[in-house]
């Protein structure tokens, strides 16, 4: 399994407990009862800029194929006549090829998103149905050593829209090209999510679901606007299909901007 910009020590600490906010609906019932996460594509997500960062910056810095391949010529024969093909400026060609890769990745790479805490009011509002949904807590969902899982996992970085010319970078320092950058970078407008994500290819008949064991879902936090009957249903399903899970209700904290969670024990 790939770790994106995390050492093994950082992964053991940062990935040990992760959280996922969700509305209470048939999808989250499926997560709890079948113990798997649906892998959405970038084209299905709420940020239209997902994966759209170009690796070939559309300017005039790339130059020609002759420059890129250090003077190699392109010759071919037609009717036994040797023809020398002049090199063209390849910026537009490479940029278009990069756009095609972006469009393919947006439909063929699956993503599972997580956050780093259960007490984020913005996440509760936007992702958990305005406090009527839940927050799922996963412990060691990628395993104790994060080994043996197909895919890449790591934290999302936030910043301005980058201008990357990966062709020029390859010429200057081929050992430090970062091919994963566009999958783990978002605008600063999303930085309050504190997102971690897992990505993997879902094309060629691969599963759209990431499975986890019956001890991985360790807590479910219910929004303070969730109905009592829905909280009871959360509890019943969680206990039936998971061995190490606890369910919590929530109230608004006094003298704070967060929530207070209490163990639910009907």
Image (tube, helix red, strand yellow):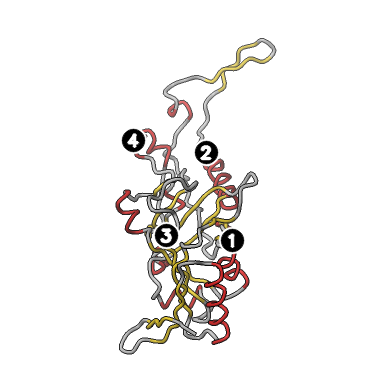
Pointer 3 local density, CA inside 10 Å: few below 14, some 14–19, many at least 20: many
Q: Is residue 228 left or right of residue 138?
A: right
Structural distance between the alpha carbons of marks 3 and 1: 18 Å
Which of the two labelled residues, at mark 2 and mark 1, occupies the earlier sequence position? 1
Q: Secondary structure at mark 1?
A: helix
Structural distance between the alpha carbons of marks 2 and 4: 19 Å
What label does residue 196 carry, if any? Answer: 3
Q: Quadrant of residue 12?
A: bottom left
Foreground tag (3 vs 4): 3
Q: Which residue is mark 2?
A: 94
Which of the two labelled residues, at mark 1 and mark 4, occupies the earlier sequence position? 1
Which of the two labelled residues, at mark 2 and mark 4, occupies the earlier sequence position? 2
Circles 2 and 4: CB atoms closer than 8 Å: no
Q: Secondary structure at mark 2?
A: helix
Q: x, y percentage for residue 84?
A: 56, 18
Circles 2 and 1: CB atoms closer than 8 Å: no
Q: x, y percentage for residue 128?
A: 51, 75
Q: Quadrant of residue 230?
A: bottom right
Q: Give the residue at x 44% y 29%.
A: 68
What label does residue 124 carry, if any? Answer: none
Foreground tag (1 vs 4): 1
């Amino acid at each position: 399994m790939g770790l994106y910009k995390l050492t093994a020590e950082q992964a053991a600490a940062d990935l040990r407990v992760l959280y996922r906010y969700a509305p209470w609906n048939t999808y989250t019932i499926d997560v709890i009862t079948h113990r798997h996460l649906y892998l959405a594509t970038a084209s299905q997500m709420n940020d239209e800029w997902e994966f759209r960062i170009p690796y070939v910056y559309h300017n005039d810095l790339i130059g020609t194929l002759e420059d890129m391949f250090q003077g190699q010529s392109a010759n071919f024969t037609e009717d036994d006549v040797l023809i020398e093909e002049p090199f063209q400026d390849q910026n537009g060609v490479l940029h278009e090829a990069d756009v095609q890769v972006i469009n393919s990745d947006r439909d063929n790479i699956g993503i599972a998103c997580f956050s780093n805490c259960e007490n984020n009011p913005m996440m509760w509002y936007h992702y958990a149905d305005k406090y009527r949904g839940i927050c799922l807590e996963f412990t060691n969902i990628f395993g104790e050593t994060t080994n043996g899982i197909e895919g890449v996992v790591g934290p999302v970085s936030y910043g301005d829209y980058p201008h990357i010319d990966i062709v020029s970078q390859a010429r200057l320092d081929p050992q430090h090209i970062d091919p994963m950058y566009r999958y783990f970078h978002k605008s600063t407008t999303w930085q309050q999510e504190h997102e971690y994500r897992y990505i993997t290819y879902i094309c060629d008949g691969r599963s759209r679901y990431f499975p986890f064991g019956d001890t991985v879902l360790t807590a479910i936090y219910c929004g303070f606007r969730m109905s009592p009957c829905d909280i009871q249903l959360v509890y019943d399903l969680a206990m039936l299909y998971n061995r190490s899970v606890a369910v919590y209700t929530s109230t608004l904290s006094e003298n704070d901007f967060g929530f207070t969670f209490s163990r639910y024990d009907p």
